[in-house]
Structures are given as C-alpha cells and as structure tokens.
Image (tube, rainbow, N blue to C red):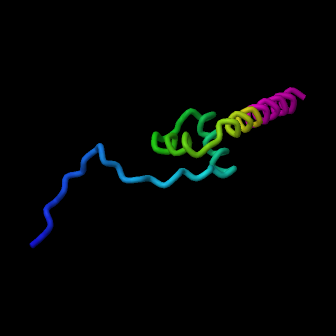
Amino acid sequence: MTEPVRPHHPAVEEPTPPPTKATFGQTLAAVAWSFFGVRKGGDMRRDAVSINPVHVILMGVGVAALIVVGLLLLVRTIVS
C-alpha cells in the first residue's frame, strides 16, 4: 500500500538556513545593477537579507565618485 499524499499547508513552513553574508563581489554587483536600474526580484530579495546596508552606501558613494571623476577626465581629454 502507498502512503496518502499530504497536501502542503502554507502555514507549516520548513525551516530555512540562515542567510550567508555577501562577499565584496556580490555587494559590488548589487550596486552596479542599482546604477543600471535593473534587478531580478529573486536577486533583490537575496541581497536584502545578505548585504549590509552600510557596505552598500559606502560602495555606492565610492562608485558614484569614480563615475564623476571618470566623466571629468573624459571631458577634459576631449576639450584639450
């Protein structure tokens, strides 16, 4: 005899492992995608639980500064 199929009840959730901390590359990728303006929903949810917000802010400011300096150098090169 086979066992009856038990329906999955949404109130009974299986335990999930704790989220791992994001690496430098994962944080950089999340910041780069945010500058581009496109991100998958699943990736965004994974980043929300694994990335430290302070790291994102610091990296975002650093990347923005690099973009500004790069644009200034590009304009100075073209104008000169």
Residue 44, how many percent across, how many down? Answer: 51, 40
Instruction: Kindly identify the residue that appears in the image at 31 percent across and 48 percent down.
Output: 12
Q: Name which residue lies at 53% across and 36% down.
A: 38
Query: Please, is residue 53 above or below residue 43 in the view?
Result: above
Question: Quarter holding the C terminus?
Answer: top right
Report the number of numbered marks.
0
| In the image, residue 78 lies in the stretch drawn in magenta | yes
On screen, residue 27 versus residue 9, left or right, reads right
Q: Which x, y percent locates residue 52? A: 65, 41
Q: Is 46 displayed left or right of 27 in the figure? A: left
**Magenta-tinted stretch:** 63-80
Q: Is residue 5 above or below residue 36?
A: below
Give me the residue at 54% from left, 50% from top. Answer: 19
Of all residues, the one furthest to the left in this rendering is 1
Q: Is residue 24 above or below residue 67?
A: below
Residue 79 point in image, percent of width and height: 86, 26
- Decide which of 42, 22 is in the foreground and name it: 22
The quadrant the N terminus occupies is: bottom left
Is residue 10 highlighted in magenta? no
- Residue at x-position 19% and y-position 56%: 6
Position of residue 29 in the picture relative to residue 66 (left or right): left
State which quadrant residue 47 falls in. top right
Residue 8: give x, y in percent of width and height: 24, 51
Residue with the most extreme bottom position: 1
**Outermost right residue:** 80
Q: Main secondary structure of the magenta part?
A: helix
